[in-house]
Image (cartoon, rainbow, N blue to C red):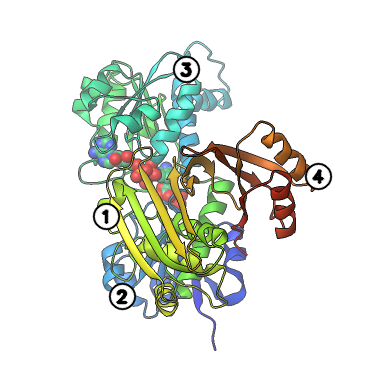
Amino acid sequence: MPKPIVLIAEILSPATIDALGGDFEIRQTEGADRSQLLNDIVDADAILVRSATQVDAEAIAAAKKLQVIARAGVGLDNVDVPAATSAGVMVVNAPTSNITSAAELTMAHILGSARYFGAGNTSLKAGEWNRKKYTGVELYEKTLGIVGLGRIGGLVAERAKAFGMRLVGYDPYITQARAAQMGVEVVDLPGLLAVSDFVTVHMPKTPETTGMISTEEFKAAKPGARFINVARGGIIDEEALAEAVAAGEVGGAGIDVWSTEPPEHSALMELDAVNVTPHLGASTAEAQEKAGVAVAKSVRKALAGELVPDAVNVAGGAIHEDVRPGIPLAERLGRVVNSLADSSVTHFKVEVNGEIADKDVSVLKLSALKGLFRDVVSDQVSYVNAPLLAEERGIGVELVTDPYCESFRNVTRLTATTSEGQRISVSGTVTGPKLVQKLTEVNGFDLEIELTDNLLIFRYEDRPGIIGQLGQALGANEINIAGMQVSPSATDNDALSVLAVDSAVSEEVVKAVAGAVNASAFSGVSLNED
Ligand SMILES: NC(=O)c1ccc[n+]([C@@H]2O[C@H](COP(=O)([O-])OP(=O)(O)OC[C@H]3O[C@@H](n4cnc5c(N)ncnc54)[C@H](O)[C@@H]3O)[C@@H](O)[C@H]2O)c1
Ligand SMILES: O=C(O)[C@H](O)COP(=O)(O)O
């Protein structure tokens, strides 16, 4: 049988090809060359792009076998998602692959505009020695206005804080509590412009945000403020910016993204106080590797007929972006339940609590079931066959949602009853811009520990010295502890310890360690991917 064809339309990290593996025929094309693209896409099963390839309705219609469009990055501005959906083509991206790189480039632009990096560099290379002209300002104790407090805005806040900046932010879609967590004071846009020495934008480009910072906003801004755009071209109106800088109203700017790429005859190019970069936000070795590997994995899954967590439109039905991070979490929690179960599960409940409860979260039930079965059946468990496996085994499955969630934005809680009457519960959440998975509860014991690949769980009668005994017993078996959480019971004298360890621990060793602390219940959980 011929191998499926994966068409790579832009330069991607070599790690992408390694992660695709040997199951595909990999072809290269030049995505920016329209006629070459339309010719080469015809028999492709999957296409991998960055932002320079227009995968529009025409390209999708030309692609007779296409099953997946993979964007090795975040923005889908160059992909016609509705056209892909109506053609039954899955679209995937790599939503967190380049956020750190984009946040770091933002800091580079903030610093660069504060210190005339571009102009100083050009001037010195032209043989001048002009120290006075390029006297800048410090960031320390200046105010940074962040417009858009999402993933990248949050990472910028974290970094700017380290420079001693005061942070104000505007984002009508996030809660005060979330902004407070970031150390950002929420204000309205005029309020932000009035007090900010630097303004940086981190929103998507939408009809609402296009041209959101323009002549009026420059006039309302603090005189001499500097403006940074590492988000999307046109959120800051380039022509109005050039005029405001030339008029001395705006002190400087750092622009990475352009309303037309590459930009044509922009007046910004002529201005000393404006530093420019050619859309380099994601252009680091790390971001490219992360993006390439993430989409390669998604392509493998998509072509194997599995549900893909990073898909933005699955089988015509979209998974909301706030629900997507919960998919791998639910699967891993399902695996934890399976590890804790002493006998077969007869009833399985998936509770989704918090802000995502009003979205369609049925995929989380499928994912949790997939996790429950993944380590116990020899067949490849998919989102499609997991419910069938439950039915075959007579497992009653329920999904319950509740928008109320006390401690986190969202928590997924799985409870299971086994044929021997054992009751198991585990809860988890996904936190921060890096979407860190956390275990927040096991069998009624509240915790907060990263859901790493190898965990050990011990329940015992609480008494002094146990932590030392656990450490000693694990050390004697050459097991390194990477993290630990102890949770005393609210109802009896027991405590539960969850330890994150560096490698999988054999059942024999887990038993020996449990014996050393006289544990009444214990489990070794291994969530390795292989
Ligand atoms: N330069 C680059 O190479 C590069 C790299 C990665 C991402 N990006 C771009 O950076 C931007 C931010 O990415 P992200 O991952 O942080 O996105 P995100 O979705 O995590 O955050 C966007 C934030 O903008 C807010 N927002 C939406 N409309 C708004 C409005 N009208 N006013 C104020 N806030 C509004 C949202 O509530 C959200 O909190 C996107 O445009 C993305 O395409 C650029
Ligand atoms: O949307 C993105 O991921 C960034 O703008 C990066 O785009 P790029 O992959 O073309 O550099």
Gap in angstroms between the C-alphas marked 2 and 1 = 31 Å
Query: Label for residue 476?
Result: 4
**Closer to us: mark 1 or mark 4?**
4
At numbered mark 1, what does the secondary structure look like: helix, strand or loop?
loop
Percent of width and height locating residue 190? 21, 23
Gap in angstroms between the C-alphas marked 3 and 4 = 46 Å
Gap in angstroms between the C-alphas marked 1 and 4 = 48 Å
Q: Nearer the viewer, residue 70 or 126?
A: 70
Name the residue furthest bottom.
1
The reply to whether dot 1 and dot 3 touch (C-beta < 8 Å) is no
Q: Earlier in the sequence, mark 1 or mark 4?
A: 1
Gap in angstroms between the C-alphas marked 2 and 4 = 63 Å
Gap in angstroms between the C-alphas marked 3 and 2 = 52 Å
Tag 4: Cα neighbours inside 10 Å, few (<14), some, or many (≥20)?
A: few
Q: Which residue is mark 1?
A: 359
Q: In the rendered view, would you say 366 is above or below 137?
A: below
The reply to whether dot 1 and dot 4 touch (C-beta < 8 Å) is no
At numbered mark 2, what does the secondary structure look like: helix, strand or loop?
helix
Tag 2: Cα neighbours inside 10 Å, few (<14), some, or many (≥20)?
A: some
**Closer to us: mark 2 or mark 4?**
4
Percent of width and height locating residue 333? 48, 56
Q: In the rendered view, would you say 526 is above or below 204?
A: below
**Closer to us: mark 1 or mark 3?**
1
Residue at x-position 36% and y-position 39%: 150
